[in-house]
Amino acid sequence: MKKLNIYMLKSYLGPFVFTFFVSLFILLLQFLWKYIDDLVGKGLEWYIIAKLMFYASSTFVPLALPLAVLLSSLMTFGNMGEHYELVAMKAAGISLRKAMRPLVILSVIISVMAFLFSNYVLPVANLKFGSLLYDVRQQKLAFNINEGIYYHGLEGFVIRVGKKAKDNKTIFDVKIYNHSKNRGNLTVTTAERGTMQLSPNEKSLIFTLYNGNRYSEIINVSRYRESRPFESTKFKKQILNFDLSQFQLSHTNEDLFKSHYSMLNIKQLNKSIDSLSKKYIKSENRYKENFFRGYPHLAKIDTSETVIIDSASQLLIDTIVLPVIYNFETNDKLAIIENAQRAARTAKKKIIDYERELQTRQQIITKHEVAWHQKFKLSIACFIFFFIGAPLGAIIRKGGLGLPVVVSVIFFVLYHVVSMTGEKAVKTGEWNVEFGLWLSTIIVLPLGLFLTYKATTDAQLMDTDSWTKFFKKFDFKRKQIDA
């Protein structure tokens, strides 16, 4: 039995590691496709891109791990069924339940590790990934001047180069417009030729220009708008330095991102939810006090009793408005009605603004609760997917990357679509958190139990003859009822 357990573990671990990294690689390609415009052309160092891809891969584990468990378990038992190894085990008196025992224990270990990863590693990975991606997206495109095109990348300057030599350093027909003083196009430098190169510390760009002119409008004298004084300077050689620090990747303080719900563990989420809930109740009570202070007569209304009337407007006019209005002159009546309408509109606007504020606060609390449930959802999904893949592989008896991949993708897409639908419904307030987040698990759990029962009882689930007999029997009963 010990040799069988070792054999089962070896047969399972190989496909599991392979499918996990393949799934991770596919998700990483999706990430690169999505953010390719933010990465290309910015002169990023290779280690910056490597760090970004590593952190991104860590955030994809909650998607890749359940899929790997499902696919590897289906492949393992599918291969064994295809090569009649499961038949040999049953002939030796070893049931499928006993054969699955070491892999069940391994699935429990994977589920526990998935929970620990989701609670302790994933928040840090989200923090590193989010802050680094923000820095990369804020990074300017790398310095690159093309022939005949006005370059606006340097802050305060516009540069145009008519032609560049093959060495990519010598330039001809150079024009440099200085806008650094934010007063328009006041200074222009032209040159027949020149060279451009980086300083030794690569923090500035040095332009050495030859045979050129510098034109500038003088605006620091009185009545310059009328006289338009102009200055022209001719030079044989001029050196200009441009600061390139704006092209270097700046690192944002990670503390600015730490409060986000996706970057907190369970303990921190509990603390944040409790704090946000107290602020929600405090804000609600404060607004009620301020509202009833401005409209004290509304505070006396008993809201516990519901009064049903045919026309609320007519009742209000007959019992309150008309008896009071009749005591005033016509002009005063109009002024009173206008003031009442203005007060009603103001009160309505305050209520709408307050309702929106409360909805925003509730959405933030809900997002924290969603993140809290997702810590457990990952580990539960890994455990359930094993009990879908293993018995399904034993039933269909097909290994490799053909049918198992198709079946696994179908089950996983179903689970993921239901999961995303429930999560969006929860965040919009249509469903409560527990139902929306665990709906996908509730759907796949009975399926896993059903497949496990069928596989352990040697039910012919994929046998077409048995299904034909079943439907014929069902059709026969229906005909008896109709008769």
Image (cartoon, grey):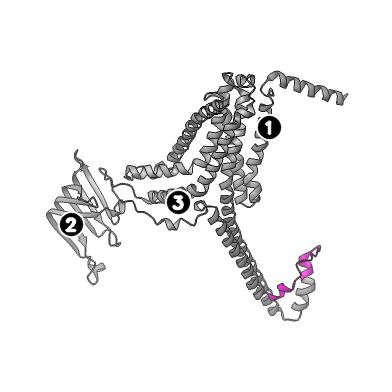
Q: Which mark is residue 214?
A: 2
Q: Earlier in the sequence, mark 2 or mark 3?
A: 3
In the shown orientation, is residue 117 left or right of residue 36?
right
Q: Quadrant of residue 384?
A: top right
Q: Earlier in the sequence, mark 1 or mark 2?
A: 2
Q: Position of residue 463 (x, y in %)?
A: 68, 20
Where is 77 relative to 235, above or below? above
Label 2: element kind: strand
* Residue tagged 1: 450
Looking at numbered disc 3 in the image, what kind of residue is underneath it? Leu
Whether residue 409 is visible here, answered yes or no, is no
Looking at numbered disc 1 in the image, what kind of residue is underneath it? Phe
Q: Position of residue 393 (x, y in %)?
A: 60, 26
Range covered by the magenta-colored residues: 295-316
* Residue tagged 3: 127
Q: What is the quadrant of the N terminus in the image?
A: top right
